[in-house]
Image (cartoon, rainbow, N blue to C red):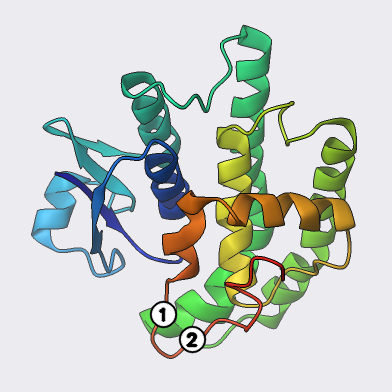
């Protein structure tokens, strides 16, 4: 049995869940309050972060490394191109969302609006929220520019780059922090991704005390 220690609204955990689902690998989800790490969890990952994946008698951490392990050990269907230049582009965009987008947007909106309350860390910092709300416009415009030239973010086929971006945006969509009217191109791309069977369990997630908006699970918005 594959087991994933996760938190439902972690984009990094969602990225791994999407990858497993695209590979049609069944997984047991174990919700982990990583901000209150138990000794057992710290033994699995001394960094005290999710996701942590138990697979093939191994315990793996760090979402990008986990996803590439899954890709290499279960190569079909393919989520990373064979061409070196195309693989670079996928990795570049994964880093863009996991680093830059996470720092400028996800952490400023999701963490401030929701995680702080769940973790008992006080009220949102309005400066951070305002900054995140401003910066997401830049990132949506960049995605629109990419998609004007390509069918998917990194090229002509769906890749791990699309799953990474969708994982972050799905978390923000849960708290109604994505202006889908800003770009019809990005909205159409997200509708394609969230219509995939791999997205079903994400759209069914519910965080107690934080119901998602009505459009969240609507495949046609």
Q: Secondary structure at mark 2?
A: loop
Residue 3 percent across, percent down from the top left:
20, 49
Task: Residue at 51%, 79% (x, y): give it.
Answer: 114
Task: Residue at 14%, 63% (x, y): give it.
Answer: 38
Judge by depth and name the residue closer to the eye, 192 or 154: 192
Task: Residue at 37%, 19% (x, y): give it.
Answer: 72
Answer left or right for 126 relative to 68.
Answer: right
Picture disc at residue 173 = none
- Quadrant where the N terminus is found in the figure: top left
Picture disc at residue 210 = 2
Residue holding disc 1: 207
Residue 164 percent across, percent down from the top left:
57, 44
Q: Secondary structure at mark 1?
A: loop
Answer left or right for 120 relative to 138.
Answer: left
Whether pointer 2 and pointer 1 mark residues with C-beta atoms closer than 8 Å, the reply is yes
Residue 66 percent across, percent down from the top left:
36, 34
């Amino acid at each position: 049995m594959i087991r994933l220690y996760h938190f439902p609204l972690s984009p990094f955990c969602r990225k791994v869940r999407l990858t497993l689902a695209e590979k049609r690998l069944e997984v047991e989800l174990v919700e982990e309050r990583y901000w209150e790490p138990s000794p057992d969890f710290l033994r699995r990952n001394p960094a005290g972060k999710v996701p942590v994946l138990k697979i093939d008698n191994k315990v793996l951490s760090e979402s990008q490394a986990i996803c590439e392990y899954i890709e290499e050990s279960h190569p079909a269907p393919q989520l990373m191109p064979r061409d070196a230049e195309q693989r670079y582009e996928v990795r570049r965009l994964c880093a863009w969302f996991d680093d830059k987008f996470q720092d400028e947007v996800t952490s400023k909106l999701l963490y401030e609006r929701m995680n702080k309350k769940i973790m008992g860390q006080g009220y949102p910092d309005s400066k951070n929220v305002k900054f995140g709300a401003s910066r997401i416009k830049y990132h949506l415009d960049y995605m629109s520019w990419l998609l004007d030239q390509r069918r998917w973010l990194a090229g002509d086929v769906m890749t791990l780059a699309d799953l990474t971006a969708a994982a972050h945006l799905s978390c923000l969509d849960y708290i109604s922090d994505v202006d889908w009217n800003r770009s019809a191109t990005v909205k159409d791309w997200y509708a394609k991704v969230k219509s995939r069977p791999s997205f079903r369990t994400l759209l069914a997630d519910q965080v107690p005390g934080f119901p998602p908006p009505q459009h969240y699970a609507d495949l046609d918005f």
